[in-house]
Image (tube, rainbow, N blue to C red):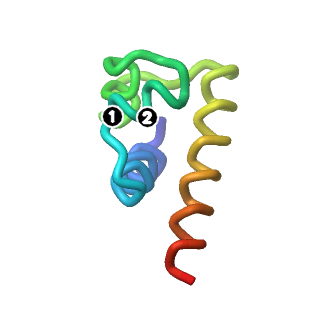
Amino acid sequence: MSTELTKELRRIRKAAGMSQMDMATRVGVSLLTIQLWERGISQPNAENAEKLEQTLKELNKGAADAKN
């Protein structure tokens, strides 16, 4: 994952008040997987990238709605 994407993953997760474990459960991966993605050590496969993208969109939308 690019550095920007790893920072965005962490930023959105934290803004939503989610732990790495919460995110892992929501995406359907292990805690270690989320940790590796956030550090930029590994990348999600196509299926997990899709789940992650959907989750981040939902969290980002929820954060935006909460501000309004």
Relative to 39, residue 9 above or below: below
Is 38 located above or below residue 35 in the figure? below
The answer to whether the residues at label 1 and label 2 have Cβ atoms under 8 Å apart is yes
Q: Residue 49 lies in what quarter of the image?
A: top right
- Above or below, comparing residue 3 to residue 29 in the picture: below
Q: On the rendered structure, is 51 left or right of 13?
A: right
Which residue is depicted at the point 33% across and 34% down? 20
Image quarter of residue 47? top right
Quadrant of the drawing holding the C terminus: bottom right
From the viewer's perspective, is 22 left or right of 66? left
Q: Nearer the viewer, residue 32 or 63?
A: 63
Q: Which residue position is annotated with label 1? A: 20
**In this view of the protein, which residue sits in the foreground, 25 or 54?**
25
Q: Identify the residue shown where x is 52% and y is 73%.
A: 66
Q: Residue at x 40, y 16 (%)?
A: 30
Label 1 element class: helix
Indicate whether 6 appears above or below 44: below
Rate crowding at label 1 as few (under 14), some (14 to 19) or many (20 or more) other CA atoms within 10 Å: some
* Number of numbered discs overlaid on the protein picture: 2
Residue 39: where, in percent of width, then height?
Answer: 30, 34
In the image, residue 26 lies at what x, y percent? Answer: 52, 31
Mark pair 1, 2: CA separation: 5 Å
- Residue named by callout 2: 23
Mark 2 residue type: Met
Indicate left or right for 42 with 64 as reference: left
